[in-house]
Amino acid sequence: MKRRLLRSARNDKCVRMAKEEMALIEELERKLDSFDSAERKRALAALCEKVEAGEINLPEAGRDVNLHCHTFFSYNSYGYSPSKFAWLARKRGLAVAGVVDFDVLDALEEFLEAARELGLKGCGGLETRVFVPEFSDRVMTSPGEPGITYHMGVGFPRAKLEGEQKEFLLSLRKTAQQRNRDLMERVNKHLQPAELDYERDVLVLTPSGNPTERHICLAYARKAREVFGETDSLAEFWSEKLGVDAESLELPEGRDLLNTIRAKTMKRGGVGYVVPDKGSFPLMADTNQFVLAAGGIPTLTWLDGTSEGEKAIEELLEVAMSTGAAAINVIPDRNYTSGVKGEKIDNLYEVVELAEKLHLPVVVGTEMNSPGQKFVDSFDSEELSPLVPVFLKGAHIVYAHSVLQQKCGLGYTSDWAKKNFKSAAEKNEFFRALGSSLEPGQEDKLIGLSEDVTAQEILDKVTRAPRPET
């Protein structure tokens, strides 16, 4: 009896200690999302120490990738910081991970540093909206807005820019924030008495003063709750202002409410919407030149192939590529329903086939800038699994570019790359092979390589690097 009691006591103690350790890990993970960068850094260091001590086991990298995660430097519906996303990506065993924020590179340095500490293959970029004169009368990826499309730069080597690149980047932030302020003023008139003050109600939702339309929607939801409380009056207010039955909108700040606020007040037909003029967004051509000059890869975004502009995807790609676009971004999960054949999944396969034909790396990932979005696409699904090799190849190309450009300026879009490869296919195979074999701990081996180095010499610097297929 005494032995059984001792064993039971020991078991209880072990269970209690395990619970305490789990609670400590959860608290450290929570601190990764602090607006205080020093607190985030300390929390990540503590988690890394637990990994080193064998208290946390991290998996080997698999085949899943996400190169399109927004952080709280623009909008992440889960509040993820760059460090938090890096940590979760490593815990999940992602092969490559990347951050993309709207109009800023604020997340880049922190994310790349966290990725290196965790042994994660990482890269970063930005997303913005641009004007395409050749498609001025056709809708592309921005619903209801002819001539306007979302656009990206991926694989930036650093966030600290100088000269014209610095000014262009600052102009993206400034223009976006002015659009937001003007938009809020128009919507305020309609949503009285739930009016917002930009500094007090919106800016506080971000760590670096870069709120998006989604932040404004969240601020309106919280302001309405502040004014009306969680009462019938709140539902009556939203029903009247949005013209829908608000009882089904997950009050006080659920996904359906936030999306409806955005659709009914900020998008085409809404009280806050105005048709963009020529200066509302930068030209795609100018944005491509900025991305190239800053060391990134200009990347056209693709939604689902159903808009008038995207039905002319070959023409759109030709326009984009003529000024430097060298990759294409897709978000796979939004383009199919499991077990259902349809137009969108057909369009996805067609655009991937076209990208392969044009030798454009395909960049994929889930945005996580709307509640309910997955951490990573369902690559093991029947619909997506045949495309995984293409997605993984694109991720490895971007990762290899990011490292080479950062360490020695010999990235995918560099003059060195133009001189050293006879074809786009040959270039893609080199960057795929390097990105596949290079480990984060080996990145410094590529520091200071000269313009005279050959592709094979670079591969030879990386242990067990496979030779490109011939």
Image (cartoon, helix red, strand yellow):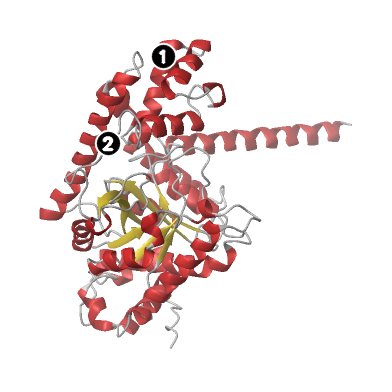
Q: Position of residue 385 (x, y in %)?
A: 59, 64
The amino acid at mark 1 is Glu
Task: Kindly give the residue lying farthest to the bottom in the view shown.
Answer: 470
Q: Looking at the image, which is closer to me, 412 or 4?
A: 412
The residue located at (23%, 60%) in the rendering is: 288
Q: Position of residue 269 (x, y in %)?
A: 35, 34
SS assignment at label 2: loop
- Count of numbered marks: 2
Note whether residue 121 is visible: no
Query: Disc number at residue 226?
Result: 1
The amino acid at mark 2 is Ser
Circle 2 packing at 10 Å, graded few (<14), some (14-19), many (20+), is some
Quarter of image, res 453: bottom left
Q: Name the quarter where the N terminus is drawn.
A: top right
SS assignment at label 1: helix
Quarter of image, res 266: top left
- Residue picked out by circle 2: 208
136 horizontally vs 385: left or right = left
Q: Earlier in the sequence, mark 1 or mark 2?
A: 2
